[in-house]
Image (cartoon, grey):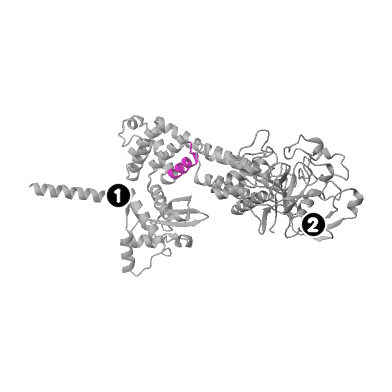
Amino acid sequence: MRIFFIIGTVFLSFITFLSAIEKKETAAVHDFNVTPALTKLNISPWWLSERMENELVQSGKYTMITRARIARVLKEQNISSGPELKPQELGKISGAQYIVTGQADYSGGRINIVVNIIDVTVKAGEIKRSFDISVFSPEQEVASRLPELLEKLAKKLSMTPGEFLEQGLEMMKAGDYERAVQCFQELGREADMQKIASLTKMVSQKQLEKEAAAVTVSGETPGEMLDYGLNLMYNGDLNKAALVFYRLQKSKMGQEIGNLMRAAKHGAKKKEEVITTLIDSARKKFENAIVSRDEKERQKDPTLLCDEAVTELQAFLGNPKVHLSDDEKRRITDLIGEIESFRKKLFAGPSKDRAWAIPGLKMEFIPVAAGSFTSSGEGAKEDRVEHEYTVKITKPFWIGKYEVSVGEFLYYLKSNSGLNRNERFEINRDIDFESPNCPINASYQIKKGFLPDMPMSCISWRGAKKFCEWLSASEKKEGRLPLNYEYRLPTEAEWESGCRAGTKTAFSFGDTTQGLENYAWYRNNTSGHQEKCGTKQPNKWGIYDMHGNLWEWCYDWYSDTFVVADSEDPRGPDSSTDNLKVLRGGSFTSEPVDLQCGSRYCFDFKTSKKNIGFRAVCAPEL
């Protein structure tokens, strides 16, 4: 008897299980459409479809007609599978009520998936539900991200109307109005809201309020009550369904649902207005940055405008009180990417006719166009006229707006902190740390009485050259060095071109020393040491201290004359028996005559002095 009882119990359980299955809607997954971009990553339509089927099985919402079973039927009937097989045909073959279709793509660094569930019992095939998802992903992570995305989509496909209601209410509490609206819209598609309203109205008409209050309801939450009522309605028990819907409507939460749904739509609209205003503001700054880049006289630094725009956008993205949909995030991040791309181009190195500042170091350079100037030596006007020659520079270059400062030189020294002892010695031997006039000590600290924005002195020609070589290597590594250009010391011709700034006079401002104190630090107006860079007036091209403050090393070996005839890109001799390199510009110890545009001096390239510094150029390789 006990055996018969066990068999009977098992049989009844099996019958109950079959009944539950019969109540479930049947579904099958069609082959996904996959773009070539995903195919190249070894993502096949079959693999995606299999994953989606597995996720739908896990959800328990549908009775799944497995792809393995469908494949056997198709093989028996000699029918090829694939996207060309229409969902209605697949529904007939498989016996499924619903066919799940999907499209997957990878483009622009984003995974994009769309899934549809189609009711094939309707002649034309009605899309019952459609969901999509789009996320950023590096190419190497696409395969690992797909299962997670398919799981999310399968959950959406399997949600009941009540679950959409519950999720919408949760989204409202979190302030995510867009997703709340989406849930409520999905609820409207899933449930016949007009029929629910008419059933609810029937309770009032028939005065069944007491019966509604007494009705036993399966579930306590609004979503559970809604699903319970819908099941009653679908099974034909309209009277009880009406009582459940009426009770839900009259409950405290039920009364709030309508208000929340309206508030969700209003909140979504309001947030869209905020996002639009934010993006418009950031884009306006971005557009101003583009205009500012192209202006010769900039009203505002374009990099600052870009920084302001990006800061606004990132602050909004990072606000924990603001919930953004993937599309909203994409709108903002796309604009950030556009601005950042433009900003990088600003730092792409010197460009024709544009001033340039090296990021980090912030060394500024002034553009000098290819062209000619008149060189006339030094001395009185009548003496200069006798030695006037035309010097042509065939390629544009950029000259330092200021002499290289103590702070900039320290930046260089400290950036080389990883060098070994011998390499450190090679750098240090070109700096006279022991001199009381040297602005820094051997520990790379600024001495008392000196400032970071004073010009660097007590540096040999060789030490100045090493600074320029380091600068070239750094900027080349960053991709900011123009092709066939380098940072180096200026040739005499480049230096004089920058000093004259298009003039033929003894000084860049005129032929006499009248007003010299406005442009130069020299013997008559200093206290025996260099002054801060850029405290006097610049020449017409905006270059400071070309007259005075410190003598400046030039690239050339010294000869008694600069040029003796009209010349093109002149350079000094190949060597000097006395190891002499050219100096230009005069210094704080100089008489006015030494500050003239054509004045020249020289010194041993291995030694240094308190009144010698240097200026860098970005110019054609030599």
Relative image position of residue 62 (x, y in whole percent) = 33, 51
172, above or below 47, in the image: above
Q: Secondary structure at mark 2?
A: strand
Is 75 magenta? The answer is no
Q: Residues within 10 Å of mark 2 (few under 14, many from 20)?
A: some
Rendering quarter of residue 102: bottom left
Of residues 468 and 239, which is closer to you in this image? 468
Rendering quarter of residue 47: bottom left
Q: Residues within 10 Å of mark 1 (few under 14, many from 20)?
A: few
What range of the chain is rendered magenta?
Answer: 175-187
Of residues 490 and 120, which is closer to you in this image? 490
Relative image position of residue 274 (x, y in whole percent) = 58, 38
Q: Is residue 97 visible in the rendered structure shown here?
A: no
* Quadrant (top left, top right, bottom left, bottom right) of the C terminus: bottom right
Of residues 496 and 345, which is closer to you in this image? 496
What residue sits right under mark 1 in the picture? 23
Q: CA distance from mark 1 to mark 2?
A: 89 Å
What residue sits right under mark 2 in the picture? 371
Q: Amino acid at mark 1?
A: Lys
The residue depicted at 35 percent of the width and 37 percent of the height is 225
